[in-house]
Amino acid sequence: MPPTQIDLRRLILLLTLAVALLLSANGFYASYRTQREQLIQQTQEANRVYAAKLGQGIEQLLDSIHLQLGYSATLLPKWMDQPERLQEETERLLRQSRIFNAIFVVRNDGLVLAGSPESLGLLNQTLRTNGALEALQKHRFLISAPYISARNNLVVFISQPILDHYGRYLGYVGGSIYLQQQNVLHRLLGEHFYQDSSYLYVVDRDRRLIYHKDPLRIGDTVVGNPAVERVIAGEMGTLQLTNSDGIEMLAGFAPVPTAGWGIVAQRPLAVTEQELNRLMLDNLRQALPLLLLSLIGIWWLSQRISRPLWQLARSAQQWGTDESLEQVRNIKTWYFEANQLKRAVLSSLALMHQRLGRLSQESLTDPLTGLRNRRGMHQQLDSWREHRQPFAAVALDIDHFKRVNDQYGHEFGDRVLQNLARLMANGSRPSDLLCRTGGEEFLMLLPNADLETARQVAERVRCSMAETRHGECSAITLSAGVAHWPETAEDVEEVLKRADEALYQAKNEGRNRVVVSEAAYA
Ligand SMILES: Nc1nc2c(ncn2[C@@H]2O[C@H](COP(=O)(O)OP(=O)(O)OP(=O)(O)O)[C@@H](O)[C@H]2O)c(=O)[nH]1
């Protein structure tokens, strides 16, 4: 087998391993993709639910602020000219609500009638801040956009109008939430501590951050963030986006309709993927023994399937030999195709052997007479020489055969040759080897016959030839020379030569006679 060729067993093994690994890898990859999608969706959904829950929390907080300020606003009209009572009320509100960083009661001309903490020092001053002006204008419960307060804090101002029992506008009571200091939003939103880089932020309707884990970013306007755009449009949903640091994020968002705010909760995609990788590695570890077992099973089965084919292929190298048939017969073919192949190989082999046998027989036989030709003779002689089998050689030659041919034609001559072959067969034993070694030269090789016996056989053939009528030609005779190995010759080649010499002598002495090699008498 050339070194570049690969045998069937290895080929099938490699193919099955490759297919098994490909299928496993494909399955593994498909499961990875599905799980990744699921995990991404779950993370986004969890963030959305979380943002929605916090949104509800803020809504409830605003409701509670509304109630508290509303209650206060019903008490305040009768105290508008009692600065101490107003001051007490602002202090109560500040202490009890634990929502605001500062509380004010402001008259309808903007003058601060009371304020807590007193340390702010705004009493009897007119407030001109955005929140204050908006409250004076709108006369309703109001949550302001973030702005810089009179004391230079970034604040959100929430106010409730104070109306007397005729519905006249007297001013408002309101509270500031300092966005850049600890406030109620920090308590509400920051209590969820993430260890995996998840975080959330809150924007107002103008996209300004009113809550962020990084206090320095509070007050910044968020630009080009699709989650922010959608949440301030009042939508709730999920998104995959890139944050301001260029990190891929899985975001869920929900609005706070009362305030026009939006909450976005997000988690880095990489963290989710890490989790997935850990999960997949665990899966792989668990699946590995089964995968190995399957591979061994596939390998075993492929061996069982390929074995008969491989054996049939290997037996092809021996198809010329006698054992090949037996070898193929012994191959166990346990499935239909291999069995059919084996049967086909067996019948082809039988046919081939039959034809080879016939060919080999033909190559050793003279077609005219059916006797052994020179090659056939030598084949037998080789065997006798090897086994030191003694034998006598009788060389026969038809006398004046040229004349017979010339006179009666070549075809007639052929029939004479065939007649002689028959006479030789009649005058010999089955174990004798009868050969036609040339045109009209014949040889009888008689194993275990001595010189005298051989001479008698030659004489018998000569007589029967002389007595035979060949069509219109009455008398055709032959001459013969007899020799023996080892009696008259030292080796096998020499005995033929001695028989030829004796035959030559018979021709010289007048033909139609048998001469025994003289060496026998020496
Ligand atoms: N019909 C026929 N003739 C053959 C065949 N082979 C050889 N011959 C002829 O046999 C003849 C042999 O002639 P020679 O060798 O001269 O010998 P001969 O005529 O037999 O004379 P001697 O052997 O001296 O008695 C030739 O004419 C060959 O053509 C054959 O297969 N068929």
Image (cartoon, rainbow, N blue to C red):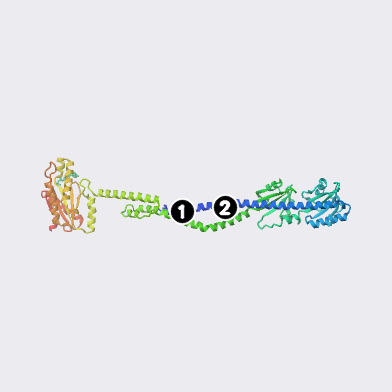
x, y percentage for residue 102? Answer: 81, 55
Residue wearing tag 1? 14
Q: CA distance from mark 1 to mark 2?
A: 26 Å
Q: Are marks 1 and 2 in contact (CB under 8 Å)?
A: no
Helix, strand, or loop for circle 2?
helix
Residue 32: mark in rendering: 2
Q: Amino acid at mark 2?
A: Tyr
x, y percentage for residue 367? Answer: 22, 46
Helix, strand, or loop for circle 1?
helix
Q: Nearer the viewer, residue 237 or 440?
A: 237
Look at the image and tell me whether residue 248 can be seen: no
The extreme left residue here reads: 510
| Quadrant in the picture for residue 86 | bottom right
The extreme right residue here reads: 81
Q: Residue at x 23, y 54 (%)?
A: 380
Q: Residue at x 59, y 55 (%)?
A: 277
Q: Residue at x 80, y 57 (%)?
A: 96
The extreme front residue here reads: 165
